[in-house]
Image (cartoon, rainbow, N blue to C red):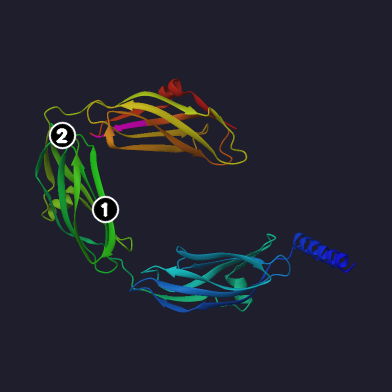
Amino acid sequence: MRQHLFCVALLALVSTGVSFAEDDTTPPELKALRISPAEIQTSAGPAEVTLNFTITDDASGANYFEAVFTDPSGGERRSASGKFNPTRSLTESAKITFPRFSNGGEWELSRVFISDAAGNTLSLDTDALRRGGFPTQLQVKSAKDTVSPKLTALSFAPPEVDTSKGPGVVKVNFTATDDLSGVNYLELSFASPSGTFKTVSTKFEPAGSFSNSLDVTFPARSEPGQWTLNTVFVADAAGNTLVLSAEGLAALGFRTTLEVKSAWPDTRSPELASVRFSPEAIDTSQGEAVVTVEFKASADVSGVKSFEVVFASPSGVMSPKGLATFSPASKEVSGSVKITFPKSSEQGAWTLLTLILSDEAGNTLVLGADVLASKAGVLQVR
């Protein structure tokens, strides 16, 4: 009898608990909030801020916290969030990292969002937090880096390459400097006589002075003639940039011309053997859908380097695309790219808008919608 009464009582408690969670329509409450420290310094490096908080919930249990700080300009945000096991009284902390050279001034806690296991939510903006007696201000001190990095040395060797029988490699040596946040990126491009480009880049840890080298590979049978070091782009960790054209490089005393020799230059565009996509119809009413574009292509000399294809919606507003690259380049390639169509994509007949094939020598084949429609047909989106 006692066992029977115990089971009935236990069943009642469990049933009450389930019913209580299902009937929970009250959002959780923010009971306590503290920002520590209230002032940070980011001139020398990143700084961490801890938000200590307490949330309560009357039934299903608080289980989520999110907070957002906004800088004085309103353009930069830093946030943190955490998901926890549901509990009626939750005391936890969240850490937010402010990177070096964050914008200085008075940042505001612009939003706190909390929720419980039943899906009830509470969103508090700055004014609401202040009315609740919670702190909202964080003082950020930081040196402001507004000066662009500098290119102090640049040279490349050899001054002449012959690609008649194989690729040629040019080594570009450089030194770049920055006065505060540190230089961390360099990109350069050589331009051929006809206007095609060879571009290389490197990203590195921020440094006041950085010296390194980049290898630029010119494929077999590259376009012959005088190539020009057309552009050098340098950036620092604060986002300041330096862009030097061929004329700007020459004005600094840097050599900008490279002689490329090739007995039998590759000037022939790659060829597309076939292209098709599947499925031919998709439904995005309930979620995203993926279309696979399969292709075969060839480039008889330097080899196929990349394949790019773009779809266009009936109105022309949406244009998802896919890209495949081949390293090393191959004279014959068979491949595929997957293109994701988002949920509720525009309905109707979509077409392949553009297809671009490129070879290692820089030659390209560009096919438009009319040609592609005859090769691949249309995609029906519902």
Crowd tier of the residue under label 2, counting other residues whose Cα lies within 10 Å: few below 14, some 14–19, many 20 or above: some
Q: Position of residue 373 (x, y in %)?
A: 45, 23
Identify the residue position indicated by label 2 in the image. 166
Q: Nearer the viewer, residue 335 or 198?
A: 335
Q: Nearer the viewer, residue 359 or 144?
A: 359
Q: Quadrant of the N terminus?
A: bottom right
In magenta stretch: residue 79: no
Residue 140 badge = none
Q: Position of residue 292 (x, y in %)?
A: 47, 33
Residue stretch rendered in magenta on the structure: 356-360
Kindly tell me whether residue 319 is visible in this rendering: no
Q: Tag 1's secondary structure?
A: strand
Kindly tell me whether residue 35 is visible in this rendering: yes
Marks 2 and 1, how far apart in space?
25 Å
Identify the residue position indicated by label 1 in the image. 202
Q: Tag 2's secondary structure?
A: loop
Crowd tier of the residue under label 1, counting other residues whose Cα lies within 10 Å: few below 14, some 14–19, many 20 or above: few
The relative height of residue 209 versus residue 133 in the rendered view (above or below) is above
Q: Is residue 166 left or right of residue 277?
A: left
Location of residue 307 (image quadrant): top left
For the residues labelled 2 and 1, say whether their Cβ atoms are less than 8 Å apart.
no
Amino acid residing under circle 2: Gly
Q: Is residue 117 left or right of residue 377?
A: right
